[in-house]
Image (cartoon, helix red, strand yellow):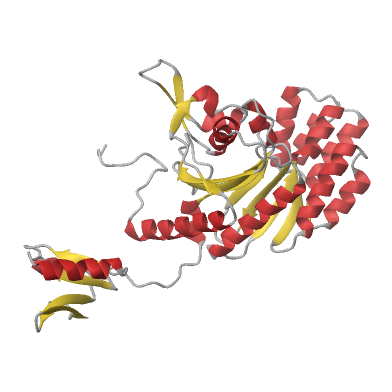
Amino acid sequence: MRAWLLPEYVEDILPAEAQAIERLRARLLELFRVHGYELVFPPMLEYIDSLLTGTGHDLDLRTFKLIDQLSGRTMGLRADMTPQVARIDAHLLNRQGVARLCYCGTVVHTRPRGLLATREPLQIGAEIYGHAGIESDLEIQRLLRAALGACEVPDLRMDVGHVGVFRAIARRGAVDRATESELLDVLQAKDGPGLADLTASCDATTRDALRLLPELYGGAEVLERARRELPQWPEIGAALDALEALVADDGMAMSVDLADLRGYHYHSGVVFAAYCAGLPNAIALGGRYDEVGRAFGRARPATGFSMDLREVVRVAARRAGPPRGVGAILAPFAQDAALATRIAELRAAGEVVITDLPGHEALREELGCDRELVLRDGAWTVQPRTAGR
């Protein structure tokens, strides 16, 4: 095996893509900043009992684990930054009112989330802590739309759901934990025969409600059908009210999916996923996750979203920019104070100036510079560069 080969689903980011990622990263963090979101940088690894608190089994399976040589305790490489940000809100900021936080950093997964996914996503996201109303869910949804719009992601649509509907049916129907877990799998897969088998022993109300969920997918009319045909329980009514408010907030093609239960053990209310042309999986995921804050000892409601910036770059509209080196200036290598001053002025003005190191004259074309600094009449001036010089 060649020593330089990388593990499966792990890859280098080369200059052109790295530059595109950095442009979008800066653009999105500035968008978050002007909306009042404060940037935080959680650590790459921490003790596993803190890292996985309140997140459920799914995140545990995706987390790389290791033993801390100093304490002997098990640590984990973060697979999701949201639990870390919840910890920061609960135990470091300790604010009583609303906190808006954002973040951007690498996470590591034991397995890729999809066929084309990396095991090393660059996660960027924004979250609101301390507000339990639909208004904060609306704010997060609008911020996500603005973020994807700023990245010029094409043909966007969003699916919204609410884990409270399934949770109410399961609890009122006294569904045991093992069956609940199996139901989650068949509902996610839209497996009708499997759902029929699992619900055969349930009471009629529970059975009919669970079997209806996969059919409750589509536009706003789905909510009307859900109100008519699902049990008239207060918790289901509240969930449908929340979804109605989100769907009514026009700005992106939206669908309702009451069988979308991804992150069920993690989320506590509204869930949503944004999709776009050119990507089989969701480009962004989010929702309400009040239980994560509770697990850290402070009952702080929370809502937010995150996405993999590497995936966003691959489907975002690429603004036509110059090829590598075009717009750059080639400067000679010389111990000249006036030259050094001129180079500093150009760089301060945003120009790319590349020093022509001795011994590489034959390879100047690899630099791709379209201009050069030339000493003319006692002054260093920029002039067009002829290919081959």
**Residue 153 in sight here:** no
Q: Residue at horizontal 54%, vertical 54%? A: 33
**Residue at the farthest top position:** 72
Q: Position of residue 380 (x, y in %)?
A: 15, 77
**Residue at the farthest bottom position:** 377
Asked where in the image residue 349 lies, by quadrant, the reply is bottom left
**In the shown orientation, is residue 371 left or right of residue 93?**
left
In the image, is residue 124 above or below residue 49?
A: below
In the image, is residue 25 above or below residue 61?
A: below
**In the shown orientation, is residue 61 left or right of residue 298?**
left
Q: Nearer the viewer, residue 331 or 171?
A: 331
Report the number of numbered marks.
Answer: 0
Quarter of the image with the C terminus in it: bottom left
Q: Residue at horizontal 71%, vertical 29%? A: 181
Asked where in the image residue 219 lies, by quadrant, the reply is bottom right
Asked where in the image residue 287 lies, by quadrant, the reply is top right
**Residue 240 in sight here:** yes
Q: Residue at horizontal 53%, vertical 62%? A: 151
Q: Position of residue 52 (x, y in %)?
A: 56, 28
Q: Nearer the viewer, residue 229 or 197?
A: 229
**In the shown orientation, is residue 42 left or right of residue 35?**
left
Q: Nearer the viewer, residue 325 or 194?
A: 325
Q: Position of residue 218 (x, y in %)?
A: 78, 55
**In the shown orientation, is residue 70 left or right of residue 241?**
left
In the image, is residue 357 above or below residue 191?
A: below
Q: Position of residue 67 (x, y in %)?
A: 40, 20
Quarter of the image with the N terminus in it: top left
